[in-house]
Image (cartoon, helix red, strand yellow):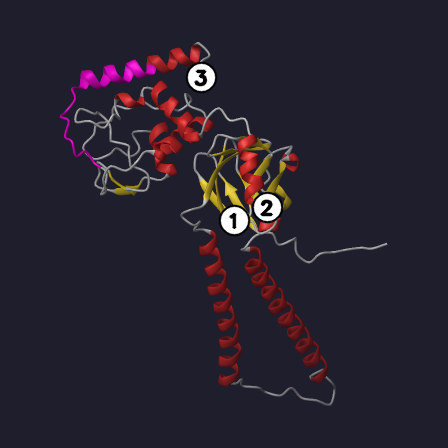
Amino acid sequence: MQFKLPLFPEQASKIAGQVDSLYLFLVLITTFFSLLIGLLILFFAVKYKRTPNRSAEQIHGSTLLEIVWTAIPLGISMVIFVWAAAIYFHMQRPPANSLEIYGVGKQWMWKFEHQGGQREINSLHVPTGRSVKVTLISQDVIHDFFVPAFRVKQDVLPNRYTYAWFEATQTGTYHLFCSQYCGTKHSAMIGDVVVMTPEDYEAWLASGKAEGSLAASGEKLFQQLGCATCHRGDSGARGPNLPGLYGRSVRLADDRTVVADDNYIRESILNPNAKIVSGFQSIMPTFQGVVKEDDLVQLIAYIKSMPSEDAGPLQNRTSPGMIRDSEVTNIQQQMRQENSAKKSSGKQP
């Protein structure tokens, strides 16, 4: 009968070896000093054991010894800090050409959607040899995206996107866990990451039943929700121009500047008054409760796909003129009525 107790899970990503090397170094350093201190305690306990014929020696200490046993742990700590920080920053910066996949955690399942519109539940297909960026959000409570074989672990939060990336190095099926207690069926929130060759992955994408790409679905929603009414990009537009928005600096009405990333776009849809673009009025109603998390992913994908028209901070460069308060009210009421009608008729946008 054979019994195997692996020290580490299988290494199936490029970063796994670096993480394991750091962890092994920590284990060895901890073991070495634990044994050293334990043996020294035993040695001094025996050597300086109190006896009736021995008087205690008065020791005044050694400055050199104090410096040595302070400098050595400090040096080791700095090595660990720099080493760990380098790995951490590497894991937090996905390459620009990464394959992007969106993931939603909810009690008690994982949902993933590829750029081509292919959807998966509790399973994630990825290719080898290419960096994969998974944009994550929770639909309810805090979850945690954890793939032990990749040494990837990322909190998945409600109301805010987080990111995890990896580059798988070998084909196979690997466990996906939620490592944050999320309710009574937390232990059942498991899935698989299926790593395929690039050729097999492309074949899998082609065989998937997708109604359309994320960007194409987002464009339909963009039209259905009436977004083009205010964000049409001409001189009379009441809202900021969106082509080329993603990744650019946005100048706000309070003179702050923010970067238009996924979280900014999501917040602007659900809470449009949080960050108002300089030169525009607050006329956009909230879509909180109108669009689902999947809809937000599609809208963001569409906005990201819009071609860039120019560079520079986004602000009102067209100066469309001021809008009367009565007109602002009419616009808001009209959009709320349209959204309420869609919800009551069962046609969720």
Foreground pick, 70 / 276: 276
Q: Which residue is mark 2?
A: 147
In this rendered view, identify the residue nearer to me: 179 or 45.
179
Q: Earlier in the sequence, mark 1 or mark 3?
A: 1
Please determine whether, in this image, residue 203 is positioned above or below residue 229: below
Which residue is identified by label 3?
348
Kindly identify the residue that appears in the image at 52 percent across and 45 percent down: 154
Q: Amino acid at mark 2?
A: Val
Q: CA distance from mark 2 to mark 1?
A: 10 Å
Residue linked to disc 1: 166
Pinpoint residue 268: horizontal percent, then vertical percent: 33, 31
Between 28 and 133, which is closer to the camera in this rendering?
133
Left or right of 207 in this view: 135: left
User: 10 Å neighbourhood of mark 1: few (<14), some, or many (≥20)?
Assistant: many
Q: Position of residue 257 (x, y in %)?
A: 26, 43
Q: CA distance from mark 3 to mark 2?
A: 34 Å
Q: Is residue 281 above or below residue 341?
A: below
Indicate the quadrant containing the N terminus: top left, top right, bottom left or bottom right.
bottom right
- Magenta span includes 181: no
Question: Looking at the picture, does residue 84 appear above or below residue 269?
Answer: below
- Label 3 Cα crowd, 10 Å radius (few <14 / some 14-19 / many 20+): some
Task: Describe the element under mark 2 as helix, strand or loop.
Answer: strand
Q: Is residue 316 magenta?
A: yes
Tell me if label 2 and label 1 are in contact, CB under 8 Å. yes
Q: CA distance from mark 1 to mark 3?
A: 35 Å
Between residues 179 and 1, which one lies in front from this camera angle? 1
Q: Work out whether mark 2 precedes mark 1 in sequence or the reverse, and give the earlier one.
A: 2
Q: Quadrant of residue 215?
A: top left
Secondary structure under tag 3 reads: loop
